[in-house]
Image: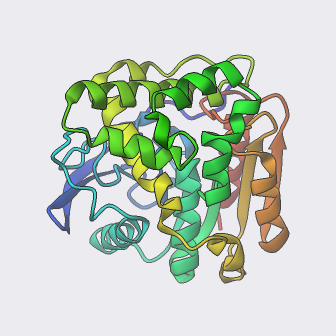
Amino acid sequence: MSSFYPPVEPYEHGMLDVGDGNRVYWEVSGNPEGKPALALHGGPGSGAGALWRRMFDPAAYRIVVFDQRGCGRSTPDAADPETSLAANTTAHLMADIELLREHLGIDRWLVLGGSWGTTLGLAYAERHPDRVSELVLFSVTNTSRREVEWITRDMGRIFPEEWARFRDVVPESERDGDLAAAYARMLADPDPAVRDRAAREWCRWEDVHVSTAPDHEPDPRFEEPPFRMRFARLVTHYWRHAGFLEDGQLLREAGRLAGIPGVLIHGRLDISGPADIAWNLAQVWTDAELVLIENEGHDASGGTTADALVAATDRFWGR
């Protein structure tokens, strides 16, 4: 049974002008005098739903959640094909986090991230280690070129029929190249039918490669045209650029995390992000504990992964 805390509503929220015409939505819940904690959602482009607040004891934590550029309640909306993504990079998101921290008057905070949020959380902590008290990361990714190639091409060895459908949406001349880049080009096509098909098929493939856990259910948000367009545009934008990070950067600079306690929680059945990603990180970040969850995949909305997340945040609140 999941041990997430009961739902809690924000007591403060707003829109922060981060420049480049972008305004990011943020909210704070829990205890105004509690230990500051920041939750970083996945995707990129998923947005920060209410579940992220429930990973923390609201009596112990001052819980900060925000929607990253272009998604959720932030503006402009990446679902609009006219919205430029030029000022939507990992460096921009890290700068947004710092602006938000300063806006809220927080000196240091625990950073929790899932999936893409682990890439962003690691990049942020390595850039600003003095601002991070602890890291709790689940469904760990580094968004490396190898990982993008694994999901968009090598995964076809596990789901051959579904991958062939995913590949064949792309023009024949591009099928042997960078599939994330090819989809990104289709998502920018002048023809709305081309854009819609690309968004639909990208999200269909997303649901396939995260489906290894026995209790997996398709993500209902992919049935919503604005959500799937927003999600597909942002994911392909970041993946085609390997997270806007130098190859191997997060592992190479993990020494910057020295002295920051961490927990890495990863499902053994998470083939979207194989367990060696978290394991390799744990080998170079010696202050981190690796928790491998048997019989669970990429999703952390319930089960033992949820229990491990809450156990980690409960452990750190008194530090």
Nearest to the observer: residue 202 or residue 77: 202
Q: Quadrant of the C terminus?
A: bottom right
Residue 77 to residue 92: above or below: above
Q: Quadrant of the N terminus?
A: top right
Nearest to the observer: residue 47 or residue 53: 47
Classify residue 257 as left or right of residue 276.
Answer: left
User: To which quarter of the image does residue 137 belong?
Assistant: bottom right
Residue 313 appears in the picture as rendered = no
Q: Outermost residue toward the front?
A: 173
Nearest to the observer: residue 78 or residue 27: 78
The residue shown at (27%, 65%) is 87
The residue shown at (63%, 67%) is 134
Q: Position of residue 34 (x, y in %)?
A: 47, 59
Q: Position of residue 180 (x, y in %)?
A: 49, 46
Q: Position of residue 252 (x, y in %)?
A: 70, 78
Q: Position of residue 57 (x, y in %)?
A: 55, 45
The residue shown at (76%, 31%) is 157
